[in-house]
């Protein structure tokens, strides 16, 4: 008798657990089938452009305007001093200006925290004077993307975030890169949240690259936004 009671209670528990599990599955599944429960993520990417302003900036800004692409310029402070009008034009046309050190020293990563801080601060003062936004001035890129512990500490002490990239055209050197090769190198970055980098440098294909790059991004359902917009979405 006792055994059959225990069996009965056992079955009751099993049955109750089964019903609860079906109910939970149903409450999760039904809304997914019958109602909107999540927005389709908007696929956004950021185009970042390093080392400007330069003699190539005006043509590049023209191409960005033609294709309606907002870009994020990681500017070298010394070049901002030499060509403030180009930086102001970029800001006026909806682009963003971020920090790429003052002198772009090849030894930026190895000269210690104090040097790195001074380089970032000098460039930041110029960006602030030009009217770059607070949001964009939070972002800095190390020279050649090389982040050493002193560079990391310097950026952190200034409340700045170092930004690397998802894909690079590798067009920052003196050897000319073709549009086709640059596109091929950037393709891995054409994914939601991708950060692309090209260079504002005379002799390189940046301006000619914008049209084909926009076409490829569109074909993948991606749209361009500034870096601070892309990163604010990520943080949300
Ligand atoms: Zn650079």
Image (cartoon, grey):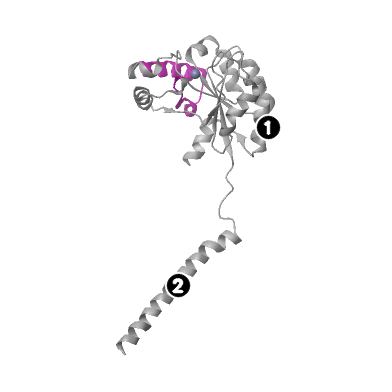
Work out whether residue 117 or residue 20 is closer to the camera in this orientation and state it. 20
**Crowdedness of circle 1 by 10 Å Cα count: few (<14), some, many (20+)?**
few
Label located before the other in sequence (1 or 2): 2
Give the quadrant of residue 223: top right
Left or right, 141 with reference to 88: left
Label placed on residue 29: none
Q: Is mark 1 within 8 Å of ligand 1?
A: no
Give the quadrant of residue 205: top right
| Quarter that holds the N terminus | bottom left
Q: Residue at x 49, y 69 (%)?
A: 22
Can residue 68 be seen here? no
- Residue 61, x across and y down, in percent: 63, 20
Q: Is mark 2 within 8 Å of ligand 1?
A: no
Report the residue marked by disc 2. Answer: 18
Q: Are marks 1 and 2 in contact (CB under 8 Å)?
A: no
- State the SS at label 2: helix
Give the residues drawn in magenta, as a range: 115-143
Count the numbered circles shown: 2
- Report the predominant secondary structure element of the magenta stretch: helix
Can residue 119 be seen here? yes
Q: Residue at x 68, y 28 (%)?
A: 212
- Residue 79, x across and y down, in percent: 51, 12
As drawn, 52 above or below 222: above
As drawn, 42 above or below 60: below
Quick check: is 134 in the magenta stretch?
yes
Work out whether residue 175 or residue 102 is closer to the camera in this orientation and state it. 175
């Amino acid at each position: 008798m006792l055994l059959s009671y225990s069996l009965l209670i056992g079955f009751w528990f099993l049955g109750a657990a089964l019903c609860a599990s079906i109910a939970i599955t149903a409450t999760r599944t039904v809304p997914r089938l019958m109602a909107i429960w999540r927005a389709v993520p908007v696929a956004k990417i950021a185009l970042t452009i390093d080392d400007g302003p330069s003699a190539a900036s005006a043509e590049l800004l023209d191409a960005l305007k033609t294709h309606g692409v907002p870009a994020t310029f990681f500017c070298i402070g010394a070049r901002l001093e030499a060509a403030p009008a180009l930086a102001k034009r970029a800001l006026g046309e909806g682009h963003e200006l971020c920090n790429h050190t003052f002198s772009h020293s090849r030894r930026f990563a190895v000269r210690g925290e104090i040097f790195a801080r001074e380089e970032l601060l000098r460039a930041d003062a110029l960006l602030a004077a030009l009217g770059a936004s607070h949001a964009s001035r939070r972002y800095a890129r190390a020279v050649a993307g090389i982040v050493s512990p002193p560079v990391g500490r310097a950026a952190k002490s200034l409340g700045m975030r170092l930004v690397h990239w998802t894909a690079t055209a590798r067009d920052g050197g003196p050897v000319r890169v073709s549009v086709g090769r640059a596109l091929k190198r950037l393709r891995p970055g054409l994914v939601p949240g991708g950060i692309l980098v090209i260079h504002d440098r005379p002799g390189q294909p940046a301006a000619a690259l914008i049209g084909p790059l926009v076409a490829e991004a569109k074909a993948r359902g991606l749209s361009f936004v500034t870096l601070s917009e892309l990163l604010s979405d990520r943080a949300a």
